[in-house]
């Protein structure tokens, strides 16, 4: 469906920073960029507005970034949801409901993410970090939690992309991923939940500190 294609492509452009927070985008401009008619683009912009990525502004939209207080709340909700999905994934593993191939794929992403993070390749690190956490949410098998996380991940990514700096402790970030991965593979739901929650909240604190150090 053209509307879904338009929505997906515009979402990617926003998340990649092609349209940063505060940027104004009209139906005509978006249609020209996507080489599509204005009707599916108009519907796509409405969908993005419903997801909180843009807000209506005249004949177009403006890309929205969360204010500091709202961003903190978004991280709190993300922490709760990722704790839930990590717990469910570990429980499924303990019950033998996760294929070994899926666990290998998760480990491969974690390893690659550690490599690009250590090398300071921020764009790749953001993409792989999200893939890692999304794969865990998929293993949890809770579609409502996954949909909610997708929206929160989008809002956080847009709101923090402009201030990204190389993490001061890349080994610490990768170490937390390894701890989370081990808890899931070992089938330890409570540990997985606690590690996931702490990791998300620590990410928010670390992001703030790194931004201040590079200011």
Image (cartoon, rainbow, N blue to C red):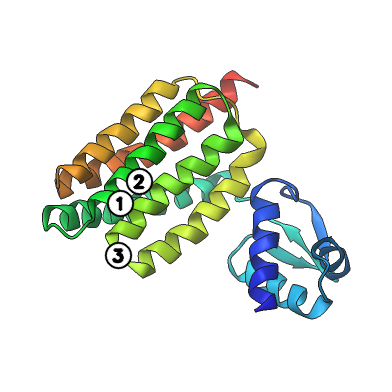
Q: Is residue 201 visible?
A: no
In the rendering, which numbered label is found on residue 140?
Answer: none
Quarter holding residue 186: top left
Which quadrant would the N terminus be assigned to in this image?
A: bottom right
Q: Position of residue 204 (x, y in %)?
A: 46, 37
Using residue 171 as the reference point, say whether residue 126 is left or right of it. Answer: right
Which of labels 1 and 3 is toward the front? 1
Residue lying at 62% horizontally and 20% vertically, measured from the top left: 214
**Considering only order in the chain, which callout, 3 or 2, is on the residue closer to the N terminus?**
2
Q: Quadrant of the C terminus?
A: top right
Q: Name above or below for residue 183 compared with residue 52.
A: above
Q: Which residue is mark 2?
A: 105
Residue at the image position 34 percent from the left and 45 percent from the top: 106
Q: CA distance from mark 1 to mark 2?
A: 5 Å
- The residue carrying pointer 3 sits among few (fewer than 14), some (14 to 19) or many (20 or more) residues within 10 Å by Cα, namely some
Question: Does 109 appear above or below 9?
Answer: above
Q: CA distance from mark 1 to mark 3?
A: 13 Å
Going by the picture, which residue comes out furthest to the left?
95
Q: Which residue is mark 1?
A: 102
Residue 150 percent coordinates (x, y): 48, 59
Tell me which residue sits at (18%, 60%) in the image: 97
Q: Which disc number belongs to residue 141?
A: 3
**Going 65% across and 55% down the picture, which residue do you hit?**
12
What element does badge 1 sit on?
helix
Q: Which of these two is toward me, 72 or 98?
A: 98
- Badge 2 crowding class, 10 Å Cα cut-off, few under 14, some 14 to 19, many 20 or more, is few
SS assignment at label 2: helix
Q: Disc 2 versus disc 3: distance between alpha carbons?
A: 17 Å
Estimate the x, y position of residue 120 in percent, counting from the top left. 56, 24
- Dot 1 or dot 3: first in sequence order is 1
Is label 1 in contact with label 2 (beta carbons under 8 Å)? Answer: yes
């Amino acid at each position: 469906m053209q509307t879904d294609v338009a929505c997906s492509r515009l979402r990617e452009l926003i998340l990649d920073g092609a349209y940063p927070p505060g940027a104004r985008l009209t139906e005509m401009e978006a249609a020209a960029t996507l080489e599509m008619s204005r009707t599916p683009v108009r519907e796509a912009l409405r969908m993005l507005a419903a997801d909180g990525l843009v807000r209506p502004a005249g004949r177009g939209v403006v890309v929205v970034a969360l204010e500091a207080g709202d961003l903190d709340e978004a991280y709190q909700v993300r922490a709760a949801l990722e704790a839930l999905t990590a717990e469910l994934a570990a429980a499924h593993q303990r019950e033998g409901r996760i294929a070994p191939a899926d666990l290998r794929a998760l480990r491969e992403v974690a390893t690659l993410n550690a490599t690009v993070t250590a090398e300071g390749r921020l764009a790749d690190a953001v993409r792989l970090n999200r893939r890692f956490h999304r794969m865990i949410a998929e293993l949890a098998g809770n579609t409502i939690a996954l949909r909610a996380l997708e929206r929160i991940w989008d809002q956080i990514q847009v709101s923090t992309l402009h201030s990204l700096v190389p993490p001061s402790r890349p080994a610490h970030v990768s170490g937390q991923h390894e701890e989370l991965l081990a808890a899931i593979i070992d089938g330890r739901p409570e540990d997985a939940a606690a590690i996931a929650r702490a990791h998300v909240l620590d990410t928010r604190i670390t992001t703030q500190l790194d931004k201040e150090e590079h200011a």
